[in-house]
Amino acid sequence: MTSMVSTRNPGMLSQKAMKTMGLSVQDLFDTFIGARGGMLSRHEYDIFFREITSTENNREAVLIMRLFIKTFVEISTDLGRKLPDYPLQSLLNSILFLGLFVDIRPDTLLKKVVMNWSSHIEAFRKDAYVAGYPEVVSILTAKLCEDKDALDGLVSNVHIMHSREVFKILTQEVVPTLHRQDFPSQSFPFVYTYLLQQCKEKNARLRVFDIVLAQLQAIRSQPSSMEQQHSLLALLHLLRSMLSYWRAPTGPFLQTAIDRVSPFFSWPTPYSLVARRVLLMLKQEMLAPGNTVLERFAAESRVPETSSVKLTQVQRSRPIFYVIDSVCSLSSNFAHLVGLYSADLYIDGENKVFASGLSTEVQALLLLNIIHSPSAPIDPNDVYKLTEEDVILLFGQTVNILQESLDISPEDAVSHRERNFALIRAQFTKIARSNEAKRIASDLSLPPVLAANLMPSLPEIAHLHWLVARDYMFPTPEVIQQLGCTPFPKTPLLDRVEKVLRLYEAFADSQDPVEVRVCIAGSDSIIHQVATAYVELMQRQSEPLKGIALRFFLVPFRNSILASYIARYDSWYNRQLYVPMVSRQFLVPTMSEEEPTFNELKPEEPLSPFGALLQSNVESYVREAEYSLQIKLFQIEGWRRVTVEEGAPDLIIPLVERAEIGRVATAMLFKNLGREGVMATLRDVKEVFRDKDFNYVPLELNLQMTRVDLAGQPCVDDVQRRQSMAAEESIPFDRISISNIPSADDPAFPPNPKDPWLEVFAKVSEHKAKLKNRYAFLIQEPLQHVNYMKLTTAREDQSFRVVVDGECFGPFKQVRIRKIEDREQRHMSLNIGTFFPIQP
């Protein structure tokens, strides 16, 4: 498939044209605040942020901040003024975002505006809901007017839970939930990213550690409400991330942290699981200081490093691959913001796999970080005198000492480390002096100046896109027989995945697999395409992933049933990814939807602040998502004709989320409601039912199914009936809904995607209420737990289509639905990375 290169619309304003016409950033501000409803074209959006983030244009940034605050105050206090087309929450989000991520050097007038802002809080209008208003005023007052870091307020915001109302205002969505309880929503996903940036400085990091421990103590001593439970997960995640990015503070911190976290180990899951992980990290740090940082870098090293030759420079990066809908304008906007470029050119161009594992440069810096201490210092600059061979030797010895420390008592671990690290330090200095005397040149590629904390940077990530069209190729029976291929729908995505797997084969290791990280960045249809490629890959070869781990992540460039489900139960995913991406207008200005265009080459200009934030959030996601949602996969086998000898199916369709057969499926196709690749809901099709041109004839189907209980045990009577192949009287069905992941207005029982069965809603047509065959109970009990279904048309002139995960397949005369098994007859799963364990 040919990528579409991003081109500028000639009708848009260029930077030169703006200056020629006398336009300014304030003109653009007036445009999106007024008539445009918070929107700018893609090119105008780029110009706006380029101007206010330019180091020479602090005046523009100060002006825009004043205008944002002035506009917010006017709208929020003027009861007679009509509310804008964009959510007022979006305007508040933008004010805090600019205050944190744009280098604003406030003048006297801006300081006065911010200081006076708090006086308007009491006059806030009652017909608009905004969360976090006082917190934003407090944070910006400290940062812009008092020259303080506002860390206390920022850490509090990281774990404060706002109400479900914020989520509804921003997204106009209701996440599926059985009891409709409050949805955990947090309004400022950029605060966490900002905190991590501030924590690069040691004093700020120590303060954040102290604040987190104090907040944990406060939760421990109060009743465990739902808000506090989600707050606990946020604090534990922040603590877990900081421990893996930087060395833990020395002194009593580790024992204090263990004492604060230990009580949560007795809480129910998922809280106990996350607390257990943090406790394990803390205890490892007590025994082997620096071990958690080593684990972080070891995890990153599992993604092979690729060299990209550009002009005279060699840029090394570790790629992640986004699967994107090529005809979706919203996905195109996010691809532009995040700075994606063609994976095909990256892999096929002047690129090659460079190495796997930790580079010697990273090993050298980690070596310094671990063995250097104020009580036993070494000269860090001696590292410039070492060779790669020296570093590999010393680093290997250091890692062995840490591993040995983990297996002995805390008292013995201290003496073991001190004794052996003293030997390593002496050896380090001796080798450096010897190399200097012998004039042995170093072959390391170290930075010219070492960082103060002697920590290497995490590897650079290349953000690459695979563009896929929302269509399939369907192999004919002759092609299947001739080529020996599987009867799955064909998608070019599989060839691209296999190309990367072949590229990584040289580094495959069954003991420590290398990773291919794939971000599913689209709607239900894109999720289905990825699942189709994955299932065929696993079915096609005996060991396609030997020594290679294929890890999947869900980045919601478009909303989907699966993304909303994960956001319902993983509050950090909801905060960092779902809300900022699914919101209609998370910030103002927002980029308007245009003809989808995608970059082929890496963007040369820096990303906008919001684009850099989204990119950072995705990088945090692929690095910090330590758990996974294991979605059990099912398959729908379809026959276009029915014969006495059933034979192999004509098509096998993976089922990830849900499927529809009958009236609702016909209505979806009638208005092509699934054209955007998003699975239509019952609310979407109600209008179709009222259309006078819509006509549905109930499907006369012969049914076989195996019901299961809540332990997954099949109904013996159903199994015996299925094995006897006894003929049944046909049943006229109005609707058959098959669910694997819950959705809003779902007629079936809320399914759990980790269960090895499906939830089925089978509504018999009302005109045959006196049905007397074996499945007559469906009239009174249409909701069933099922692990097997077979539906066959009873009339020669009738066939039916199946809508699966937003895509339509068929027509078929017969379908069979059952679990997908791998070559070892295990139920296959599609594992999606999550920050926290998903516990419905």
Image: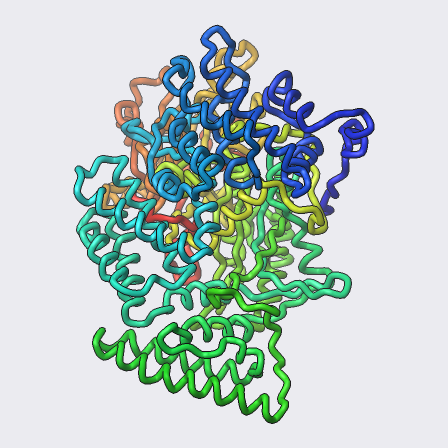
Report the label total: 0
**Residue 15: quarter of image:** top right
- Image coords of residue 689 (percent x, y): 48, 15
Where residue 660 sits, quadrant-wise, is top left
The answer to whether residue 409 is left or right of residue 195 is: left
Residue 222, given in percent of the width and then of the height, sits at 18, 39
**Quarter of the image holding residue 731?**
top left
Name the residue nearer the viewer: 764 or 55.
55
Q: Is residue 273 left or right of residue 516?
A: left
x and y percentages locating residue 244 in the rendered image: 39, 60
Q: Up-down: is 399 above or below 501?
A: below
Which residue is rendered at x = 57% and y = 33% of the image?
A: 107
Q: Is residue 261 left or right of residue 449?
A: left
375 vs 197: above or below? below
What is the residue that sits farthest to the bottom in this orientation? 438
In the image as oriented, which residue stretches furthest toward the top? 80
Q: Residue at x 45, y 30 (%)?
A: 794
Give the colour scheme of this rendering.
Answer: rainbow
Is residue 689 visible in this depiction of the protein?
Answer: yes
Q: Is residue 663 above or below residue 307?
A: above
Q: Nearer the viewer, residue 687 or 664?
A: 687
The picture places residue 623, in percent across and down from the top left corner, at 46, 55
Q: Please report the residue visible at 26 percent of the width from the left and 81 percent of the height from the top.
A: 415
Which quadrant: the C terminus? Answer: top left
